[in-house]
Amino acid sequence: MLTLRKAALSLALIFSVCHLTAQSSQDAFNAYRQQLLQGYQDYRKSILDDYDKYLEGIWEQHEQFKAGKRFTEPKPAVQPDVKAEPVVVPEPEPVSATPAPTIPEPEAPTVTKADPITPGLPAPVTANRPDAPNKVDVPRHYNVPDVTPTHSNRPGLPTPSAAVRPDAPTHVLIPRFTPEDVDKDSYDFDYRGMELSIADVPLTLKGRLNSPAEFAAKWRELKSSDAVALAEAMVEAAQRYNLNDFLTYDVLKAYVLARYPNAHPTAQMALVHFVLANMGYDARLGIDDSGNPYLLLPFDQKVYARHFLTLNGRQYYVFPVDSDDPNNHARSFISTCKLPEDADPGKPFDLIINDLRLPEKPKEFAISQGGMTITGSVNENLIPVLYRYPQMATEDFASSNVSPALRADVVNQFKQQLAAEGKSGREAIDALLRFTQSGFKYATDDEYHGFEKPYFFEETLYYPKCDCEDRSIFYTFLLWNVLGVENHLIAYPIHEAAAVRLDEPISGDNYQHEGKTFYISDPTYIGARTGQCMPRFKTTPPKIDKEYR
């Protein structure tokens, strides 16, 4: 088993590799290494060494707050079409489960002058912007070498993704494992229909924990056992599968439930909490009035559709031990132990996904529209992992990159077909717009899934139906990565769309942002051309969710 000191030294090495590759100075390396070591030691002194005392101390009751909704009104039950104006939006009531209509091929865009709109200056989004290539004309962009992934998505021990947050807290326990560090024995367990492995660390979990004193005793017992080695093994597994913070928790919970199926949920959750705390995360253990355990997790991103508590100004979302359903929450107050306000509780959980590397189970897709076809395969093992993923803001789904290899393949297919047809500039934009408008069947999330379910880009290629935010995430990604066209992912009160910056002005619905003109380009509004806004939103200033530039 690695010692904590060895883990901290390994932590310094991995973060130095990830974030300081551009710095060749040995002095900079040593300074950063010392910062990491000091940060982890300070964290241990502030929380871990005394956590059993906090568990044995004061537990305070906290009121739960009902989670907010991303859309407060129902979306159109039928896909909007320029031939069916005005667009009728239903009253706020449950959406009928009638099948979505067959989507016709769009007619050629009209040249009728649209009434310009001037929605003012929306506040720009500064977070989660993609790396921007140099601005080039669309024809020249076709000559840029194809996007080729530097590695496969298959499990192994890959170098951590370059997209790891540069401001990652310095106290996180992430040792870099080598073959001699890891016990050869491993435990295979089911994680959402696939088999994952982790170094086996046998522990003893017994009966129900009924009081603060018993939770404190369990912490001390775990602290004197091999449970810290389980934290180290979990870090190795997170590296191997390239899990983000939330999925690290999700896989850990699956392991604990599989490894100790007969343990009481309070003991299971106590182990999950101990491991996460020793990995440097701010995870809180909560108990409702009936003694049911919950884990309370804070996030870097805003989360919808899940109950939360507020502790020291930070929101903690409520997760039960055995359910992903956000409606499965405590029906009463939740109690959790009080921690010192001046202590570092650990880092919140990042929800952004970058290059998730799970065992492969290919599911082929083929989507054709307007003379263009994209084919490939989605890793079907991703689907149950993403199905009940915490509902983030739309821009956070857009900023994730679940499968870079798949995206690179789709981008290259579009580049090649547009170049072969000689399309450039407006023609290429219109081709991608038409493809997204009519290449997918339409259904609201409530109709198709029974709850609000924004898609990651990869899910749009898997599910046969999607709605406005899914198409807008898909379309804005393609505009930037296929054509290099500056664009915005934009939001209206019940609708998500896009806007593009054109080098040459056109007549149409537009707004000004930072001295540039952006034209509405709606991938859900069938038959609409760039510069044509849905009538309902012509006088509504859009909110910029994400900028591609």
Image: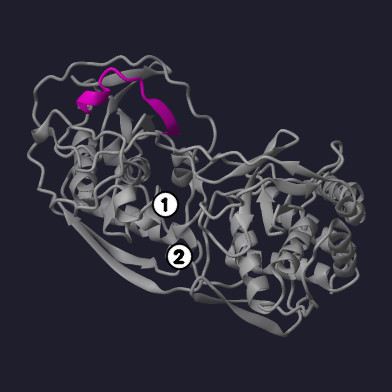
Magenta span: 534-549
> Which residue does the numbered mark 1 point to in the structure image?
456
Left or right of 397 on screen, residue 60: right
**Mark seen at residue 384:** 2
Q: How many labels does the image show?
A: 2
Tell me the crowding category of disc 1: few under 14, some 14 to 19, or many 20 or more residues within 10 angstroms, Cα based.
many
**Residue 97 percent location from the top left of the image:** 24, 52
Marking on residue 53:
none
| Few, some or many residues within 10 Å of mark 2 (<14, 14–19, 20+) | few
What is the x, y in percent for residue 86? 14, 28
Q: Callout 2, which amino acid?
A: Pro
Q: Where's the N terminus, which quadrant? A: bottom right
User: Which residue is nearer to you in this view: 88 or 373?
Assistant: 88
Q: In this view, does 376 lie above or below 530?
A: below
**Secondary structure found at label 1:** loop
| Res 502 seen here | no
What residue lies at 50% left-to-right and 57% top-to-bottom? Answer: 325
